[in-house]
Amino acid sequence: MKILGVYDSAAKAAAAAMAIRQAQQGDVVTCSPTADPLLVDPRTVRSSPIRLFTLFGALVGCAVGIALPVFTMLDLPLMVGGKPIISVPPVVVIAFELSMLGAALGGFLGFLVLGRLPRVDTGPIFDQRCTDDRFGIVVTCTEGDGNVVRANLERAGAEEVRVG
């Protein structure tokens, strides 16, 4: 069961979320028109795994940046000025450029994957006001805790409480 409480201030929403979390009555998700540190549960803050996507993209880009010129030099061996067929300076430049490209694309892909974007379905309970000027608390709880959660949300000053 999901219950949505809509608030006119972040402080009220944060108080409601903290009360629900402390009473362990369900999982709390906050909806906010802006980033607000009051609404973030400090227990859920962790480092982002996007950096792994970026690292993987950079490594793949570097591998391609080394393999492409080396295989090209071996496929068309031109000896220029007595230099070796596989020359390191051009390989390093291309490997660096493709590493940066791979890191950027990997980071962007990680952003999309971990953000579950694009979102086609907003879920069973959503209030458009939470993107404009209101703050929302969505609590996922059991049927037995539904009335208690609803009372806690109303006690914290909710303008509207809706079951979805």
Image (spheres, rainbow, N blue to C red):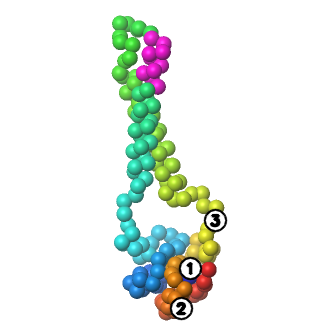
State the residue at coordinates (64%, 61%): 120
Residue 59's disc number: none
Going by the numbered disc 1, the residue's amino acid type is: Lys
Q: Residues within 10 Å of mark 1 (few under 14, many from 20)?
A: some
| 129 left or right of 24 in image | right
According to the image, label 1 marks what residue? 2
State the residue at coordinates (58%, 71%): 131
Q: In x, y percent, where is residue 44?
A: 39, 69
95 vs 81: above or below: below
**Most common secondary structure along the magenta stretch:** helix
Going by the numbered disc 3, the residue's amino acid type is: Asp
Asked where in the image residue 37 lies, by quadrant, the reply is: bottom left
Q: What secondary structure is found at the residue carrying circle 1?
A: strand
Q: What secondary structure is found at the residue carrying circle 2?
A: helix
State the residue at coordinates (49%, 74%): 29
According to the image, label 3 marks what residue? 121
| 123 left or right of 145 in image | right
Span colored in magenta: 68-77
Q: Disc 3 and disc 1: Cα gap in Å? A: 16 Å
Task: Say whether disc 2 or disc 1 marks the residue closer to the N-terminus.
Answer: 1
154 vs 65: above or below: below
Viewport quadrant of the C terminus:
bottom right
Is residue 17 at least partly visible in the picture? yes
Q: Residues within 10 Å of mark 3 (few under 14, many from 20)?
A: few
State the residue at coordinates (40%, 49%): 52
According to the image, label 2 marks what residue? 147
Q: Is there a contact, CB below 8 Å, between mark 2 and mark 3? A: no
Asked where in the image residue 124 lies, by quadrant, the reply is: bottom right
